[in-house]
Image (cartoon, rainbow, N blue to C red):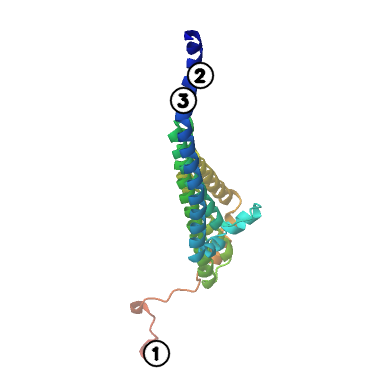
Amino acid sequence: MDNIGIHLEPARAMLFQVGAFLPRVLIALLVVLGGWLLAKAARFAVTRGLRAINFKVLTERAGLDGFLRQGGMEGDTTSIFGLLVYWLVLLAALLVAFNGLGLSYVTALLSRVVWFLPNVFIALLVLAFGAYFARFVGNTVTAYCRRLKLPDAALLGSVAQYAIVVFVVLIALDQLQVGGSIVRQSFLIILGGVVFAIALAFGLGGKDWAADRIESWWPRTRRPLDPPPGQRETPPDDESRLG
């Protein structure tokens, strides 16, 4: 009997551990189920809320929805925000569940993903408002140049718009912590190369073209200047004529 009890002792210990672990598994499943339902509700609320404040109009005018359609996505930017909120809530529920189960490695991985999703949310907001502001500035510059009757008004507006877009993309990448200083240094190097190439082109072969552009944008008046009031010529009088 003693030998049988010794052999059954590991089985008893295993059954005890399984019995102690099963309630934790059931609680984790309930947490995941509740998090899934809460995630669906949060997605619905965020999507309906953004559509109620006409956020889709801003993203459509900013060009983000058109960019997503060209990329083959069926939804728009509003649906992406709802999807991000859905996964944020669901991953938070999974984080709580795995933490209750004592799976530290999975918990550490999920915590990094959960802390990364708000950065994606903020980066999308920066892109949406930044792209809208860039288009507004581009249209304003184009309208102002056309009011001044400057040629290449559309080109100047496009340059202003895409310059702001590049700056906004850099801010979004910095928010996502993608590349860090490498992205900024690469952008500065490319910008410096473009400026140097333009300056070199103007210095070597584009002087005439640059002069024509400047002359067409800001024409110079070539009429002679009127003399000051104290130096105006007076008609000769009769005595000087006689003399």
Q: What percent of the width, then of the height, locates residue 25?
A: 49, 35
Tell me the amino acid under the disc marked 2.
Answer: Ala
**Camera-nearest residue between 61 and 240:** 61
Looking at the image, which is closer to me, 230 or 70? 70
Residue farthest along the front direction in this orientation: 1
**What element does badge 3 sit on?**
helix
Residue at left 48%, top 45%?
117
Residue 11 numbered tag: 2
- Where does label 3 land, which residue? 17
Between marks 1 and 2 in the image, the one whose residue lies nearer the viewer: 2
Q: CA distance from mark 2 to mark 3?
A: 10 Å
Choose the circle earlier in sequence order: 2 or 3.
2
Q: CA distance from mark 1 to mark 3?
A: 134 Å
Give the number of the disc on residue 114. none
Residue density around tag 2, few if under 14, some if 14–19, many if 20 or more, within 10 Å:
few
Secondary structure under tag 2 reads: helix
The spot of residue 63 in percent (x, y) is 57, 59
Residue at image position (66%, 52%) is: 72
- The residue type indicated by label 3 comes to Gln
Amino acid under disc 1 = Leu
- Circles 2 and 3 in contact, beta carbons < 8 Å: no
User: Residue 161, percent across and down?
Assistant: 53, 58
Which image quarter is the C terminus in? Answer: bottom left
Nearer the observer, 10 or 208: 10
Q: Identify residue for label 1.
A: 242
